[in-house]
Image (cartoon, rainbow, N blue to C red):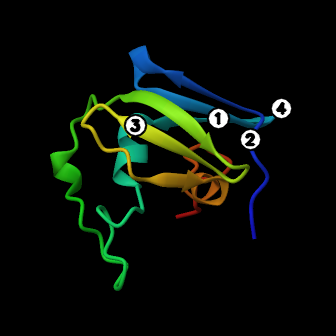
Amino acid sequence: MHSPPPQGINAIRADHIVEITWAVDHVARYPMRLLRTSCRCAGCVNEMTGEPILNPASVPEDIGITSMQAVGNYAVKFVFSDGHDTGIFSWRHLREICPCPACAPVV
């Protein structure tokens, strides 16, 4: 099942933020470091076990995104300043990690 695409995506490079507009009343600001550490590609997560391979401590606080590209109507591919470019971020995954207060899990 696919999540609906966002209305817009904007990389605010100076702030190291990707702003995704899901709806008029739902604009999320994703730190680029959060996106990099949330990558689910085979280089970042063990395909068999689902265990993380990427050590979050190895990702610089000021990591950037040098480009982004739509993947069909279901995802976006980011190219990070550390050269990482194999992750595909589905709309569903981006909604799951949405850092906005409305989406934050209740603790």
- As drawn, the residue found furthest toward the top would be 14
Q: Helix or strand or loop: what does disc 2 sit on?
A: loop
Q: Residue at x 35, y 28 (%)?
A: 64
Pointer 1 residue: 20
Q: Nearer the viewer, mark 2 or mark 3?
A: 3
Q: Residues within 10 Å of mark 1 (few under 14, many from 20)?
A: many
Q: CA distance from mark 2 to mark 3?
A: 19 Å
Q: Are marks 4 and 3 in contact (CB under 8 Å)?
A: no
Q: CA distance from mark 1 to mark 3?
A: 17 Å
Q: Quadrant of residue 33?
A: top left
Checking the image for residue 60, the label placed there is none
41 sits to left or right of 43: right
Q: Are marks 1 and 2 in contact (CB under 8 Å)?
A: yes
Q: CA distance from mark 4 to mark 3?
A: 27 Å
Specify which label sits upstream in the sequence, 4 or 3.
Answer: 4
The residue under label 4 is which amino acid type? Val
Q: Residue 70 appears at what percent x and percent y?
A: 62, 40
Specify which label sits upstream in the sequence, 1 or 2.
Answer: 2
The residue under label 3 is which amino acid type? Val
Q: Is residue 100 above or below residue 14?
A: below
- As drawn, the residue found furthest toward the front would be 72
Quarter of the image with the N terminus in it: bottom right
Pointer 4 residue: 24
Q: Residue 56 appears at what percent x and percent y?
A: 23, 53
Checking the image for residue 79, the label placed there is 3
The residue under label 2 is which amino acid type? Pro
Q: Residue 3 appears at what percent x and percent y?
A: 75, 58
Q: Residue 20 appears at what percent x and percent y?
A: 64, 35
Q: Residue at x 36, y 46 (%)?
A: 36
Q: CA distance from mark 4 to mark 2?
A: 10 Å
Checking the image for residue 6, the label placed there is 2
Q: CA distance from mark 1 to mark 4?
A: 11 Å
